[in-house]
Amino acid sequence: MRRVRATSLASSFLIALTIAFTGAGQAQAAATSYVALGDSYSSGVGAGSYQSGSGDCKRSNLAYPQLWANANSPSSFSFVACSGATTSTVRSSQLGPLTSATQLVSVTAGGNDVGFADVMQTCILGTSATCLDRVATARSYMSSTLPARLDALYADIASRAPSARVVVIGYPKFYDVEAICAGLSDTKRTAINQAADQLNSVISQRAAARGFRFGDVRPPFTGHEICSGDSWLHSLDISIGESYHPKAAGQSGGYLPVLNAND
């Protein structure tokens, strides 16, 4: 009888301890202060349901930062990502909400620095030769200039939010080059995908050098590229600004899980 009672008391103690630690963990999660920085891939261009006060930044209610905030109820949430942002404009206009109390930061940046919009325009309108030349120019910039720009951005984030976990999120490959698809040639699609791979590699390396986490969205987007038959990305769209951006499914199925895995 005593042994049963002792076992019961021990079990009750363990249950109480588990509840206490679980409650503490939940309270800590609820207290997270989150700042979402970056370009159109973070603001949610292409996902629709844009927030009325966001103007040309086109911050979407279906973008991964907003979806994360809805699910986790952080103590504070600053959604400042903006369409068209470069590493320089993130530094100059988005870092205000970062403080020593910030616990989580997400950021996408680099695609506009290397001129991916112009790359796509050139490849759509031009010959294979002009497309390959423009891709080569973008890739040269990735090697020569982008690393220092990323380093400067990441240093500013670390300085302003020294206690934060920073998740640097990359970009998907645009095309399923194995699929038969109208539009760009295999040569052009392959070149664009290779440039996306290099961009992700540069971003990943510079994030690691700063001690930040890199979130690779290429795995979840595999099977959901343009031409795949179940694309999470807009192709050339009537709404030109949404072309080659993630749809709502790409935000919820591609970007959000990567942030969740690294938050």
Image (spheres, rainbow, N blue to C red):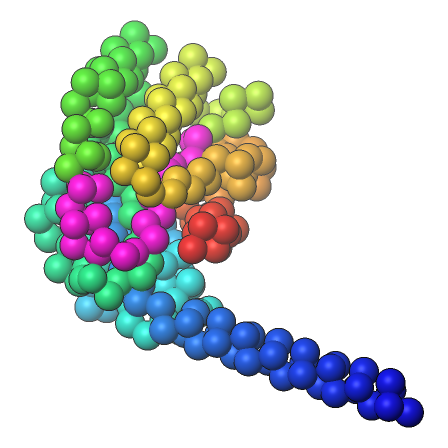
Q: Quadrant of the C terminus?
A: bottom left
* Span of residues in magenta: 153-174
Question: Residue 81, how many percent across, how many down?
Answer: 24, 54
- Asked if residue 216 lies left or right of residue 49, the reply is right
Residue 50 part of the magenta segment: no
Question: Residue 6, located in which quarter of the rendered image?
Answer: bottom right
Q: Residue at x 24, y 18 (%)?
A: 143
Give the number of callouts. Answer: 0
Question: Residue 193, how many percent across, how many down?
Answer: 42, 23
| Viewer-closest of 156 and 247 | 156
- Asked if residue 11 lies left or right of residue 3, the reply is left
| Viewer-closest of 24 and 149 | 24
Q: Residue furthest left?
A: 92
Question: Residue 160, how many percent across, how many down?
Answer: 16, 54
Q: Residue at x 86, y 90 (%)?
A: 2
Residue 169 part of the magenta segment: yes
Question: Residue 235, located in which quarter of the rendered image?
Answer: top left
